Amino acid sequence: MVKKRSRKRLIDRQEFWGFLFICPWLIGFLIFTVGPMLSSLVLSLYKYDLANSKFVGLENYRRLLTQDPLFWKSLKNTALYALLTVPLGVLGSLAIAILLNQPIKGVRLYRTLFYLPSMVPAVASALVWQWVFNADSGILNQGLGFLGLPNIEWLQNEKYTLFAFVLMSLWGIGGQRMIIFLAGLQGIPESYYEAARLDGAGTWTQFRHITLPCLSPVMFFNLVLGLVGAFQVFTSAYIMTSGGPNNASLFYSLYIFRNAFEYFKLGKASAMAWILFAILLTFTLIQFAMSKRWVHYEGEAK
Amino acid sequence: MFSIPFLWTISTALKSSAEYAKDPGRLIPANPDFSNFAKAWTALPFPTFVMNTVFITVICTIAQVITGSLVAYGFSRFTFKWRNFLFFTMLATMMLPGQVTQIPVFLVWRKLHAIDTFFPLIVPAFFGGGAFNIFLLRQFFLTIPRELDEAAMIDGASFIRIWWRILLPLSGPAIASVALFSFLGHWDAFEGPLIYLNSPEKYTVSIGLRMFQDTFGTNFEQVMAASLVHILPTILLFFFAQRYFLKGIALSGMGGK
């Protein structure tokens, strides 16, 4: 009788305290995530400009999809950007992580150097790169001139603008993503490699059959988050080109920002946000479904 | 290759206007001119900007570390109904694009007359400090043996005591990482301050830099000087915290599944 009572009380205590401790997050989640998500969904069904509101049902969505060329342009820009920057970025981070995993002298210093660019505050980074891309005195064109190649108007010519942004994003491949890859690499047991070498496997074979499969969960993680992140490009475009030239660098989140905080079309902006969410959710679910094919988790029976 | 933009930035910042106009391509300036820093510093109220940024960043970092570790404690040491569901939901929020919550949150703050104050930028940090940080800390806590907890409990320690006296002190690297990320994130923040701050005396350094660019944009050497001021604390911090930082990520990383 006594045993039962005290065990029950112990469980109650656990549950109570567990909930209590996660309360900050839970409350924050409800206030800053769930609530706003639902209300932005509702908001997207209205026309609202901080003064008047009018229920318009799916009108915002309809207009966006059929009457707003900038919607499609910004979506295209962002998609293209993501298509380039995510694979390049992930592979680049992987390459650097592998490089930095070698036991070379001074590897710590290299890790620092490679990581540094990603620590530069976004605004400062944008200003620096704006100068790098400067058609007249930027070092990129100076470098091209040195190689005998013509000057490129990186940020003024709409054909090149997107590539400029992709290039800039690659400056940060030594960052967080790389560290996560590095941690993943260091978690692969050396014994696998030894066994492979005993069997006569070359470097490439080792990479393909040990490194890649063991890294696949990390790769998956980085791909999913990379995609979500790429679609949220904002600061660099806002500062460097304000979406130009001729909207070549009008990214989706910049367009949302404009609609919400410059044109005060809050209903339309909310609709855009939800479309973005739907797109990303679809991609993420697709990635999850595909992951069963190629992501290998340690501990599975062979 | 990665350092090149850096080196050029520094070199440009040190060039006088005349020299820059003449020879922008030169790496080492002939006559280093430190006046760019002074000019940039006084052209706009940068000291105010820095103080604002420091204020916001420090408060948010402390808030995130404390609430984040409390939440991580809950997720790692207790079992309760829906715990796993809530944990995964929390992880899922990492995949949310910020835009879906941006506008209503703005409207709420507007209703509360908190636009053009620091509240919208600071308050969210008190609610757990971000899924990534919670995840990091929770993974780390999981590696600390429960026996320590149990020993303390036998001695009559309350849960809070255990958290404060045992888990936290042992989590040095993880906490340093969270603090570092948090610091960077807030020092760096642009969109938030852009949306919520309207009066120049409340601006943060990132907005200030933007203002600088608007007014003095063509004076690259001054822009570079100003940018360096913004970058400097982050680099300094990194050098000092490096050891903890890299260890912290690796420890909490993909090791715990």
Image (cartoon, grey):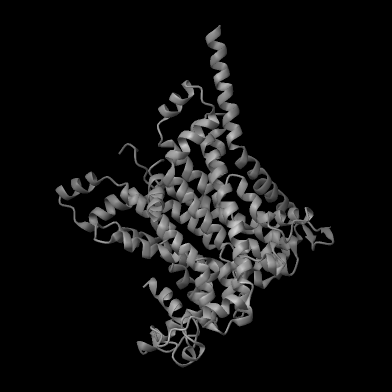
Quarter of the image where one finds residue B50:
bottom right
Frontmost residue, B81 versus A210: B81
**Among all residues in the image, which is located at the extreme bottom?**
B22
Q: Position of residue B82 (x, y in %)?
A: 57, 32
Which corner quadrant holds the C terminus of chain A?
top left
Q: Identify the residue shown where x is 49% and y is 75%.
A: A129
* Residue A93 position (above or below residue B83): below
Is residue B88 shown left or right of residue B11? right
Q: Position of residue A161 (x, y in %)?
A: 52, 78
The count of marks equals: 0
Task: Work out whether residue A247 can be spotted.
Answer: no
Which corner quadrant holds the N terminus of chain A?
top right
Q: Position of residue A44 (x, y in %)?
A: 73, 57
Q: Position of residue A202 (x, y in %)?
A: 19, 56
Quarter of the image where one finds residue B226:
bottom right
* Residue B217 position (above or below residue B72): below
Task: Work out whether residue A14 can be spotted.
Answer: yes
Frontmost residue, B14 versus B69: B14
Is residue B117 shown left or right of residue A180? right
Is residue B51 shown left or right of residue B200? left
Q: Identify the residue shown where x is 24% and y is 53%.
A: A206
Q: Identify the residue shown where x is 22% and y is 44%.
A: A191
Q: Identify the residue shown where x is 61% and y is 75%.
A: A243
